[in-house]
Image (tube, rainbow, N blue to C red):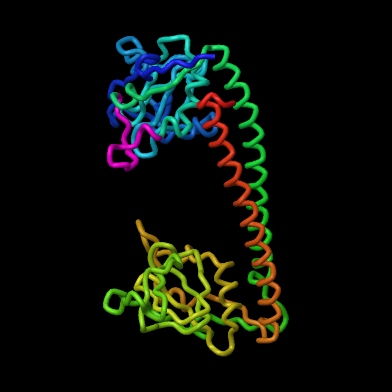
Amino acid sequence: MSWQAFRLGDLYQIGSSKRVLKSDWQAEGVPFYRGREITLLSINGFVDNELFITEEHYSDLIRKYGAPNEGDIMITAIGTIGNAYIVRKNDRFYFKDASVLWLKRTSDISSQFVNLWLQSLHFFEQLESGNGATVDTLSIQKLQNVKINIPPIQEQQRIVAILDQAFEGIAKARANAEQNLQNARALFESQLQSVFTQRGDGYEAKIFDEVLEIKNGKDQKPVEKACGKYPIYGSAGNVMGWTDSYICDEQTTIIGRKGTINRPIFIETKFWNVDTAFGLAAKPNLNAKFLYFFCLSYDFSLHNRGTTIPSLVKTDLLNIKISVPSLSVQELLVKKFTALHNETKRLEANYQRKITLLDELKKSLLQQAFSGKL
């Protein structure tokens, strides 16, 4: 069964829209889609739209320039490019020029077939620039010149039917894996909350200032050494370099001062923390790992002082309340939480691996389909 090579511009009239000014955006009326909305439509099939234009404006645009019809394809062209949506029978919308391109069908091609092809490596490999870097803008000319191999219409329909059925199964399996992943995390978090939100018998009410020391980070540039002994940690818990000096001792919890403020990291070794990260060092009356698990349960965004970049202030942190049991009870709780945390991490790894394999299976099926091997 022969496949023929075409330019995408031979199969569709490719263009964009008449510019709609921001001042013309409304809170109700006819939906107005940007790249964000097209992306959500491509993923979910629906979108809770927040931008509109008036009925009068829409009617004027249709009369002068036309609007997308059933079977046409909309594709994102700026930022996250290549997310495509097939226009349905009762869709009424207009769209933002340049950030969304319009593939107006001018042949008897199956848009379902083309839409699936637009998800394949056969398409995305052609979008790479001459130096191998992936472009972040898709022009009309670039899209017109993309080459696509097309089989007869009956074969297009057969491939679409096979892929639709396979992708439906993959989507269900992926959704189940994602739900299981969320359930594993929620179980661990609920166990933490059940301990740290209640004050048991023998617990003492403390504030951070009484049970820990906050060690400020410093600029790492003056101390960085390629072959240093100690890691340099940033606010997200990533190793940013090495040094022969350290600020924090073993078993210290890192929380971000700026940027990532709600992702505590427990560090077993001595380390240098940069100036956007705090080191929380437990005093003798507090088990260091107990402190870490408390931090995992705590919402540090309650103390966010930043407007654009999340930020924490040391004085706020020192006044955080914590209920502290005896050291022996802390140790028992740490053993319990550690076992549960390890099991949660194991389950997360398994579910994440399954999600990755399902994504790879989808890519493989697309590759086979558009290489004529399905």
Whole-percent x, y for residue 59 in the image: 36, 13
Q: Quadrant of the C terminus?
A: top right
Comparing 290 with 78, the one in front is: 78
**Is residue 31 depicted above or below 250 in this figure?**
above
Chain part drawn in magenta: 125-140
Q: How many marks?
A: 0
Residue 307 appears left or right of 331 = left
Q: Position of residue 365 (x, y in %)?
A: 57, 32
User: Where is residue 370 drawn, in percent x and y?
Assistant: 51, 26
Nearest the camera: 13 or 206? 13
Is 214 magenta? The answer is: no
Look at the image and tell me whether residue 30 can be seen.
no
Above/below status of 7 relative to 200: above
91 in relation to 188, above or below: above
Q: Work out whether 40 lies above or below 65.
A: below
Q: Residue lying farthest bottom?
A: 284
| Residue at image location 51% in from the left, 18% down from the top | 88
Work out whether residue 141 can be spotted: yes
Q: Position of residue 151 (x, y in %)?
A: 50, 16
Identify the residue at image location x=48%, y=24%. Answer: 115
Q: Main secondary structure of the magenta part?
A: loop
| Quarter of the rendering occupied by the N terminus | top right
**Quarter of the image where one finds residue 133:** top left
- The residue at 53%/73% (across/down) is 266
User: Does the magenta portion include 131?
Assistant: yes
